[in-house]
Image: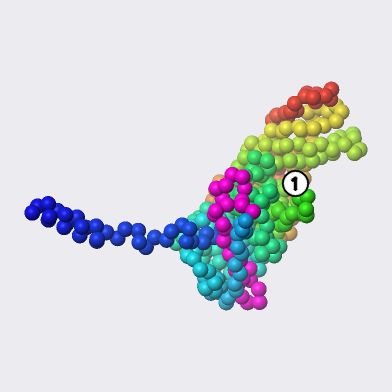
Amino acid sequence: MKKKITLLVSLTAVLLLSGCWDVSEPQRMYYVDGIGVDFKDGQYEIYMQIINFANVAKSEGPSPQGPQSEIGYAKGKTMEEAFFKLYRSIDQEVFWGHLTYLLFSENALKSEKGIAIIDSFLRHRETRYQILTYITKEPIKDIFLITPLLNKSLTASKLSNPLHTKEIETYVEPVDLRNLVIALNEPGHEVNIPLVSISKSWETTEEPTKETELTGVGVISKDGFKGYLDNGDARGIQWMFHKKTRGEVTFKLDNKEKEYLTVDLEKLSTDIKPIVKNNEVTFEVDIKFNAIINGFKGKINTDQIRKGIIKAVKTDITKTYEESLNIDVDVFRLSEQLYRKDVKMWKKIHKDGKIPLTKDTISKLNITVNKVNPGRKSFDETIKE
């Protein structure tokens, strides 16, 4: 009798268990990798990139059969309306947990619309704060249709994973939603979003190919889009932030008419110190580098190299700073530096979180090159100490 009662209780418990009946099978879902947002003629235009995960785990590269992704497009009076129009043309559940990046047009980030768009993605329960953000001048559809070189998986693309090339060069620092929100809430209330362009530097045996490229930054504030720093105008940013970065400078050697040298630089540290005097604030900047020489002709000495590096880095920083003043942007976040180190002075002079900036606000720019590494020695040319 006891055995029958135990069996009956066990069967009842099994029947009452919910199990996983309400869980969608992975193969029955579509996975969103990127979202593009534009705003034209009073309507939001949405581009949804759904990725084919069957190709992701294959080390030899995606299968030639079938596309790597599908691009959906819809528009509506609100962003949510546009998304629901896309849902009506989709025959499986959409999973947002793998959303990797957001790509905005300039129009999408103008005025108060930009903050509302960003906020809507933050509020969605399936999205994460690690989603990367970009801005572009190019048609969003054209960028979404680009596949990585050698037809690698889209999860390895520059937009999905920009840190893959960080060991080669750190020209523009990636910005995720978390850092974007922090920057907009800290003094200055501005953030530099990487600018995406289309590069045509590559080609196959059959035809030229396109690739995405980070060519500068677009700056937004709580009031909307402020402007671009591109075509080399953003080069100084990489030298002025605290994180270690890697890049290059090319400069003309002294006493040589047509002789140029390209040097790899590893930025070790950046120290920005506010100097308060007579209710005015200036900043002294100290930056330290190590340099690696990959190729040169003739005989040169380390003093020539150091002078060339210092001049080139100062030119990059000065150009970026002056161009940022033209669009009323605190590109080096000097307002935040004062806020962190002398909040009383910041409270006296700030306006909407931003302090007055002029060409002379950066009073000193000290560049130190600690080491000059000549690389492998293959020929008779030498670097003299």
Whether 63 is among the magenta residues is yes
Q: In what quadrant of the picture does the N terminus appear?
A: bottom left
Mark 1 sits on what residue?
Answer: 316
Look at the image and give the residue range highlighted in magenta: 36-64
Image coordinates for residue 287, horizontal then vertical, percent: 67, 38
User: Going 61% across and 69% down the picture, which residue do you hit?
Assistant: 73
Image coordinates for residue 209, horizontal then vertical, percent: 74, 54
User: Going 54% across and 72% down the picture, which residue do you hit?
Assistant: 89
User: Going 61% across and 58% down the picture, which residue do you hit?
Assistant: 66
Amino acid at dot 1: Asp
Provide the secondary structure element on which disc 1 rests: helix
Residue occupying the far left of the picture: 1
Mark 1 nearby-residue class (10 Å; few <14, some 14–19, many ≥20)? some
Viewer can see residue 192: no
Viewer can see residue 289: yes
Quarter of the image where one finds residue 358: bottom right
User: Going 54% across and 60% down the picture, which residue do you hit?
Assistant: 32
**Total of numbered circles in the picture?**
1
Image coordinates for residue 44, horizontal then vertical, percent: 60, 72
Between 218 and 78, the one nearer to me in the picture: 78
Q: In what quadrant of the picture does the C terminus appear?
A: top right
Residue occupying the far right of the picture: 257
Is 126 placed above or below 363 here?
below
